[in-house]
Image: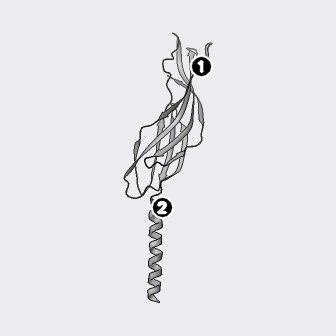
Amino acid sequence: MRRIAFILISAAATVVMTATSALADSPHFIFATNSIDSTGALVTSFKDAGLGTGASSIAITLSAEASATYQCYNKAGNKPQGVPKHFGPTALATPPTPFPVSHGQTTGSLSLGPLGPGTFGCPSGQILFLDAVTYSNTIVSDATGNHTDATPDPISATLHIKV
């Protein structure tokens, strides 16, 4: 009877240890949440788990399509006649950025954008402002090939930032 109990307990322990190591090496994002900061940049916060206990860091990348609208204003703060200048959509991506792994997971954030005005400028006596940004198709990826769509997507903001 003791021998059967020992075999059953050993088998159960083996199943539990195998299941735990299988779960620990199953990379997946718990969340990836988008926001736009006061500069008009996309900021994506994320949590990547199931990375195993052997990894000390993992490279994470953020990619998105970005659009921006620039407008000239006179010194009184009014829009002179003329059409705002729209840029994009243009694909942007961060370089692979290492994040520390602790207990098989990492949490962090990456940012990119906004698109610049290129060679667009204002006539003398007017000031250039970034008035709007939009980001879509935002994807967070890790070095294991794991990826997820960040939400909300698309995300937009109306701004008024002097360039």
Which of the numbered marks, if any, corresponds to residue 99? Answer: none
Q: Secondary structure at mark 1?
A: loop
Residue sitting nearer the eye, 7 or 109: 7
Image location (x, y in percent) of residue 91: 51, 32
Residue sitting nearer the eye, 8 or 86: 8
Mark 1 neighbour density, 10 Å: few (under 14) some (14–19) many (20 or more): some
Image location (x, y in percent) of residue 1: 47, 90
Which of the numbered marks, if any, corresponds to residue 84? Answer: 1
Name the residue tied to disc 2: 23
> Considering only vertical position in the picture, is 130 above or below 5?
above
Q: First in sequence, mark 1 or 2: give its number.
A: 2
Mark 2 neighbour density, 10 Å: few (under 14) some (14–19) many (20 or more): some
Specify the amino acid type for callout 1.
Answer: Pro
At 45% from the left and 58% from the top, the residue drawn is 25
**Colour pattern of the rendering:** one colour
The quarter of the picture where residue 103 lies is bottom left
Marker count (numbered): 2
* C-alpha gap between disc 1 and disc 2: 52 Å
Image location (x, y in percent) of residue 122: 52, 14
At 49% from the left and 25% from the top, the residue drawn is 116
